[in-house]
Amino acid sequence: MKNNLPIGIFDSGVGGLTVYRALHRRLPDERFLYLGDTARVPYGTKSLSTVERYGIENARFLSAQGIKMLVVACNTASALALPAIERAAGVPTVGVIESGARAAVEAAHAKIGVIATEATVRSGAYRRAIKKLAPQIKVIEQACPLFVSLAEEGYADSDAARLVAQDYLSGLRDEETETLVLGCTHYPVLRSVISEVVGEGVRLIDSGEAVATDVAAALAERGLQRAPAPQKGARPRQLCDDLDHFYVTDAAERFSRIAEMFLGRAPRRLEAVEVWGHDELNVRR
Amino acid sequence: MKNNLPIGIFDSGVGGLTVYRALHRRLPDERFLYLGDTARVPYGTKSLSTVERYGIENARFLSAQGIKMLVVACNTASALALPAIERAAGVPTVGVIESGARAAVEAAHAKIGVIATEATVRSGAYRRAIKKLAPQIKVIEQACPLFVSLAEEGYADSDAARLVAQDYLSGLRDEETETLVLGCTHYPVLRSVISEVVGEGVRLIDSGEAVATDVAAALAERGLQRAPAPQKGARPRQLCDDLDHFYVTDAAERFSRIAEMFLGRAPRRLEAVEVWGHDELNVRR
């Protein structure tokens, strides 16, 4: 019964769709509930207490829909508020920081670069997670706040993005890092510009792909996997099909448009909801 | 008694400080309460119902502090929700759209360009306001969503901003507009790049300066002006001095830093508050 429940995913907005895509690819039998907090995006420039409050409200909302596990796709919320979010969710909760840190440590020997939002960098969460696994590795962190809007506004592959990337990443290039963690769900959208600027020899770590591996392991460990579709010859799952449900806190149309740009397909089931309210849950249907 | 009350100003974030500066310069005897809704910035990519709700909550908060007039410095909130905001405020309320439109019509004969957020452009508010004053004038509108983050992240005078501006503004340049309304409080920060791209012959209209004129007139009309300081030789008012009070809904430190960049001085009185809640007002002190 419980195994049939979907996995919840939340992000501050559309960026977490890159995590949804990785989870969907890795776990094709699972169903997903995705919440994009588009009314309050971005999180990366906001304070710890605000990000924590938003994360708790999102977790409560998804939990009330019935989920067996929660994935915090947003790096900023994972970095600042994972324990509080897990308490609010009441189900096993996986953030993206530890997964990304482990994948980076597996790929690097001496130096790891991390690019992320202001709030994530300020929290030092990636540095701590990497140092815990490999204390000898040098960690170089850099905030790249403009990357989010460049990705959202369709400027991922522009000369403007290239100039901004050169500005943000010159220090990392000089440090000759071997591995660079894309520590914000939006950054994979700028992957080609980032790779061009830091050099093709630098391995880019996408936390979304790393977290999918960890979620698969956590499901297996708890015996929580959903059974594969019984009929042979059943149509394979597709991204954004009827089994996955998407919620946004604002502007469903904009979300749908950007999802189509990111995933090549718009969600079939998409609803606008309210997740805030001080004591109880308010859902607009 | 009422004349001594401050004038309330709200914006989605720091951009409205350009309006505060214009009001302060024009009305040196007045006191101001400024609210920056930094926990929910930006408004320009969000929907009408969300922007309206945020605007109403901001108006109620300022109204509860005691104000004699409200200035909606945010173009998006002015464009989408001015009547609802005025009802919530319960005091005379001035938005930036009509003031900007009038200043543009005074300066133009045939063609006016308007650059603004996605939501403001979609609302058509500037077009309507200009057409009401001068139906024969052609209005060309263009959304420039990346300008907000370029201004906030200190890239106002960069080559990246220049490239993005060339991309957004090439259509306006080809149309040979005489006058260009900077229809978002952040855009005056990019004034020199914008002027360079559209050509120095194009007159740029800053809605902040235009609204200061209208607020002065509205105060005079209602006899609501504050009396000048009684003592002769009293020190002149300064921006951000003790008489003006600033509130933010998040990250006071970041606000203070950006205010210093915009105004050359950080607010002396700055508090973090909560303005949301469904029925009553929640103020965190």
Image (tube, coloured by chain):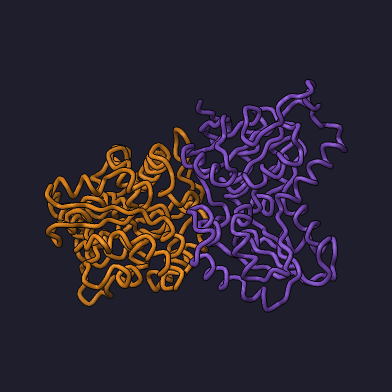
Chain colours: A purple, B orange
Between A241 and A213, the one lying in front of the other is: A241
Give the residue at x 20% y 57%: B112
Between B269 and B152, the one lying in front of the other is: B152
Whole-percent x, y for residue B124 in the image: 28, 44
Give the residue at x 45% y 35%: B280
Residue farthest front in this picture: A233
Between A228 and A74, the one lying in front of the other is: A228
| Up-down relation of residue B280 to residue A195 (above or below) | above
Whole-percent x, y for residue A66 in the image: 69, 27
| Among the 4 quarters of the image, the one containing residue B202 | bottom left
Give the residue at x 16% y 47%: B131
Q: Is residue B126 left or right of residue A40?
A: left
| Among the 4 quarters of the image, the one containing residue A138 | bottom right
Give the residue at x 44% y 73%: B158
| Up-down relation of residue A280 to residue A264 (above or below) | above
Instruction: Please indicate, yes or no, whether residue B29 appears anywhere in the rendered image.
Output: no
Whole-percent x, y for residue B43 in the image: 42, 48
Numbered circles on residues, count: 0
Whole-percent x, y for residue B130 in the image: 18, 50
